[in-house]
Image: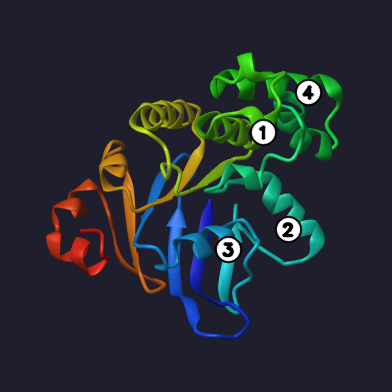
Amino acid sequence: MIKLSNISFSYEKKREVLKNISLEIKEGETLFLMGENGSGKSSLMLLMNGINKPFEGEYIFKNEVVKYNKKNLRELREKIGIVFQDPDMQLIAPDVESDVQFGPLNLGWNLKKVDESVHNAMVICDVVHLRNRECHSLSYGEKRRVAIAGVLAMDPEVIIFDEPTTWLDPYHQREFKDLLKKLQENNKTLIISTHDIPFAQEFKSRYIFLKKGEIISDGDIELFENDDLLEECRLK
């Protein structure tokens, strides 16, 4: 589904923050990007969403080379949704229902399709009871769920989460884990950036470890038994 070949990226021609990244992600796969702050996780996710443009290499999505023109990027972002670390970056409408409706309405869907998709997303994220609440009055955990519902309502094929457990208490972490498992059951492709090892280990998934913009390991849950790797990535 996603194929990156020899991708390199930098901000304003300064030092490279992604170096010669090659990576394939299959449809329906759950992938964790592991690494300390500044390792390149967020830059890589923003590249997959089309926000960051590589200066070298090739990005292929669903067997087509990504071209960085307005039409192509719009299509890419309809298929690859991203949930940012801070939900306040995404909540732009005054109330919950309007916020979740915003994305689908801007895709030009008819109202029946919008209503169905919004309702389904709000049910999955358990925010139906919040639909008339003002966004600014929500708790952090509630804001996070509403932000996810807003992305889900657009029915993307891939959903990217940036440090999703940051600032979540144990109760809301369990809620979020249950939500991710629902998305897995619906065959969504999930890409999750985190340095939260206990949370990542809950999924027995695929894990990529990044250090200074380079992939240094790609494998399964057994990688967490490699103390040298964890220390090299400053995760231990």
Report x, y in % for residue 34.
34, 56
Q: CA distance from mark 1 to mark 3?
A: 30 Å
Tell me if label 4 and label 1 are in contact, CB under 8 Å.
no
Q: How would you rate the neighbour count of disc 1 (Cα within 10 Å): few for under 14, some for 14-19, many for 20 or more? A: some
Using the image, tell me which numbered label, if any, was put on residue 73: 2
Q: Which residue is mark 3?
A: 47
Nearer the viewer's eye, disc 1 or disc 2? 1
In the shown orientation, is residue 115 left or right of residue 193?
A: right
Nearer the viewer's eye, disc 4 or disc 1? 1
Q: Amino acid at mark 2?
A: Leu
Give SS at disc 3: helix
Q: Amino acid at mark 3?
A: Leu
Tell me if label 3 and label 4 are in contact, CB under 8 Å.
no
In the shown orientation, is residue 128 left or right of residue 3?
A: right
In the shown orientation, is residue 96 left or right of residue 217?
A: right
Q: Which residue is mark 1?
A: 136
Using the image, tell me which numbered label, if any, was put on residue 233: none
